Image (spheres, rainbow, N blue to C red):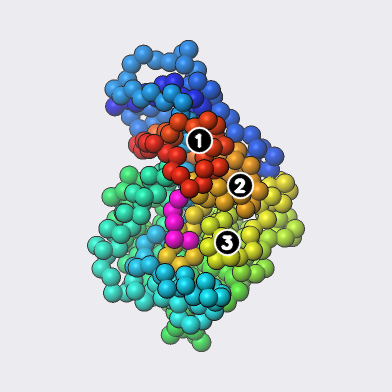
Amino acid sequence: MSILITNIKGLVQVRPEAVSKVKGNAMKQLPVLDHAYLLMSHGVIEAFGPMSECPDRANEIVDASGKYVLPCWCDPHTHIVYAGSREGEFVDKINGLSYEEIARRGGGIVNSAKRLQTVPEGALIDAALGRLAEMESFGTGAVEIKSGYGLSYDGEIKMLRVIRKLKDLSRLKLKATFLGAHAYPPEYKQDHEGYIRLMIDQMLPTIADEGLADYIDVFCDRGFFSADETARILEAGARYGLRPKIHANELDYSGGIETGVQYQALSVDHLEYTGDEQIRALLASDTMPTLLPSTAFFLGLHEPPARHMIDSGLPVALATDYNPGSSPSGNMQFILSLASIKLKMLPEEAINAATINAAYAMGVDDEMGSITRGKKASVMITKPMPSLTFMPYSFANNMVERVILS
């Protein structure tokens, strides 16, 4: 089966030679081939070039006159397996309660954990498939999904088994992350050692035996897991071959960035509190800083210093943090808009952050994130647009007309 897209106004993120990420000033450079074609065959990108060199046949021919074609977004940080929404906490936020105050009252992550215990796997799968379909409609082709709403042996293993089934059922490329260290469950509030031992001695061996996770994550921040506790959990995960992806510095200078760098994390995420010391640590590493601007927007948090990070020479990735409490949306187009409006990222920087760098942040840059021969046929065709900048500019509209996934 072959698909030929013709008369493309602009073929975006064209990289004849594969690159794993772009950083610093290079993030301003977004290669676009004007008036182009793209040929995909047997699920991979076979050829592309100017229309003057376009092949004359394929099983399906799509005319993209006036439209752009981009690699699908990669979303490297989500929590889309959950039971029920938390709009009551939305009202609490309007009334002035902070994220931490809601958590102390039994809301937040613990609230989602209570609900998940009684919901069967089938219902969780159906709900998550609906969210994935919605994300795909906005142009997303790859998603990392975390556990972390189980907060018990049975709950965490159930979540990871659900994610494994989603991998079989969804058209999207999925990665699973074990986030047992999302919060301390109420029964372990005064016994941190007991919960850490539960994760290390019981959860991790089962996860490894069943091959349930690709990565391990810890919420390393004020009021959650300390840097020392995070290090212990990451060391245990490493013994089972799980590379870290860390929640870091969302609420304070927690040491999470430095811990992530020390343990060669694939990414450190959130990063609202990032100063020169943390930037220097990241510059000396292969860890991808991943920003979640919708979370800062929804919670009214201090925003991550994206402009300073990029100007200092760092790469940056973007993700939705799709979850019921602090970012109840999987719309990556809106993330691009927030990156430009709130974080002062140029549209080119935001698109690089949501494609090639986001692919790196979830470990799929060898097969997704750019228009490169041999990579997966995972692309979106936009609606007619006057320019590429129109996508983040038109923040309330879905500018994707069709998504093609191999």
The mark found on residue 340 in the picture is 2
Q: Is residue 336 left or right of residue 54?
A: right
Residue at 45% x, 31% y is: 384
User: Quick one: SS at disc 3?
Assistant: helix
Amino acid found under the numbered disc labelled 3: Ala
Residue 211 occupies quadrant: bottom left
Q: Quadrant of the C terminus?
A: top left
Residue 147 in the image: state x and y as whole percent. 41, 64
Q: Earlier in the sequence, mark 1 or mark 3?
A: 3
Residue 263 visible in the displayed image? no
Residue at 57% x, 51% y is: 338
Q: Would you name the residue on which mark 3 appears?
A: 296
Q: Is residue 10 left or right of residue 153?
A: right
Amino acid found under the numbered disc labelled 1: Ser
Residue 349 in the image: state x and y as whole percent. 61, 42
| Camera-nearest residue between 383 and 287 | 383
Residue at 69% x, 50% y is: 307
In the rendered structure, are the residues bearing label 3 and label 2 in contact, judged by CB atoms less than 8 Å apart?
A: no
Q: Would you name the residue on which mark 1 appears?
A: 370
In the rendered structure, are the residues bearing label 1 and label 2 in contact, judged by CB atoms less than 8 Å apart?
A: no
Within 10 Å of disc 1 (Cα), the crowding (few <14, some 14-19, many 20+) is many
| Camera-nearest residue between 205 and 91 | 91
Residue at 53% x, 57% y is: 294
Within 10 Å of disc 2 (Cα), the crowding (few <14, some 14-19, many 20+) is some
What's the magenta region? 327-331
Within 10 Å of disc 3 (Cα), the crowding (few <14, some 14-19, many 20+) is many
**Is 229 placed above or below 130 here?**
below
Which secondary structure is most common in the magenta stretch? loop
